[in-house]
Image (tube, rainbow, N blue to C red):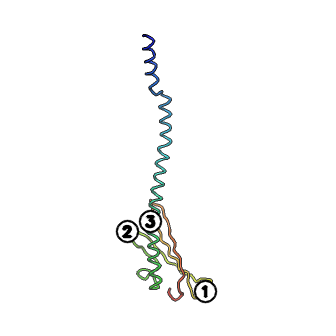
Amino acid sequence: MRFASCTSSVKRRRAAFTLAEVLAALLFMAIVIPVALEGLRIASLAGQVGERKAAAARVAERVLNEVAITGTGPEGTDSGTLLEGQHEFQWTIESVAWLEDNALQETTVRVLYFVQGREFEVTLTTLTEAATL
C-alpha cells in the first residue's frame, strides 16, 4: 500500500507547471501580444485609409465635374476644402496644356486627407477643352 501512495504523490508533482515552463510561457506571451497589437493597429489604419480614400475620390470627382461644367472649381477657386461626412478634404486644381492637342488641357484634381496623423493623397486627371479653364 505504501507503493500506491507514492505513485499518487508522483502524479501530483507532474500535474503542476515548473518555473521554467511558466517563464517560457510568459516570454512567449511577451513576444506575441505586442505583435498582435501592431497587427490590429495596421489593420485599423488600412481600413480607415480605404474608407477615406473612397470619400476623397468622390470629392475629387465632384470638383472635377464642377470644373468641367462651370470652368472653375467650387466657389470659383482653384483650391479649397470640402466636407464629406464628418471628414475634411483639401483639394487643388491644376491645368496644363496637353502636348498631343493644343485644344485640350490636362486637368488634375489632388485631394489631401489625413488618417491617424498621416497625410494621404488621391489624384484624378482628365482632359478638358482649353476654353473651359
The one of 61 and 116 positioned closer to us in this rendering: 61
Query: What amino acid type should be assigned to the residue bearing mark 1?
Result: Asp
Give the mark nearest the N terminus, 1 or 2.
2
**Mark 1 secondary-structure assignment:** loop
Q: Quadrant of the N terminus?
A: top left
| Residue 8 placement (x, y as % from top left) | 43, 18
Task: Report the residue marked by disc 1.
Answer: 101
Asked if the residues shown at circle 3 and circle 2 are in contact, with their CB atoms under 8 angstroms apart, the answer is: no
Q: Tell me the quarter of the picture where residue 116 sits.
A: bottom left
In space, the residues marked 1 and 2 are separated at their CA atoms by 39 Å
In space, the residues marked 3 and 2 are separated at their CA atoms by 10 Å
**Mark 3 secondary-structure assignment:** helix
| Residue 43 placement (x, y as % from top left) | 47, 55
Query: What amino acid type should be assigned to the residue bearing mark 2?
Result: Gly
Q: Point out the residue furthest to the left here.
A: 86
| Residue 39 placement (x, y as % from top left) | 48, 51
In the image, what residue occupies the spot 44% across and 81% down?
Answer: 66
Task: Report the residue marked by disc 3.
Answer: 52
Q: Point out the residue furthest to the top here.
A: 1
Give the mark nearest the N terminus, 3 or 2.
3
In the image, what residue occupies the spot 44% across and 77% down?
Answer: 62
Above or below, 54 against 9 in this view is: below
Q: Label 1: few (<14), some or many (≥20) within 10 Å?
A: few
In space, the residues marked 3 and 1 are separated at their CA atoms by 35 Å
| Residue 35 placement (x, y as % from top left) | 50, 46
Question: How many numbered marks are there?
Answer: 3
Give the mark nearest the N terminus, 3 or 1.
3
Task: Report the residue marked by disc 2.
Answer: 85
In the image, what residue occupies the spot 48% across and 28% down?
Answer: 19
Asked if the residues shown at circle 1 and circle 2 are in contact, with their CB atoms under 8 angstroms apart, the answer is: no
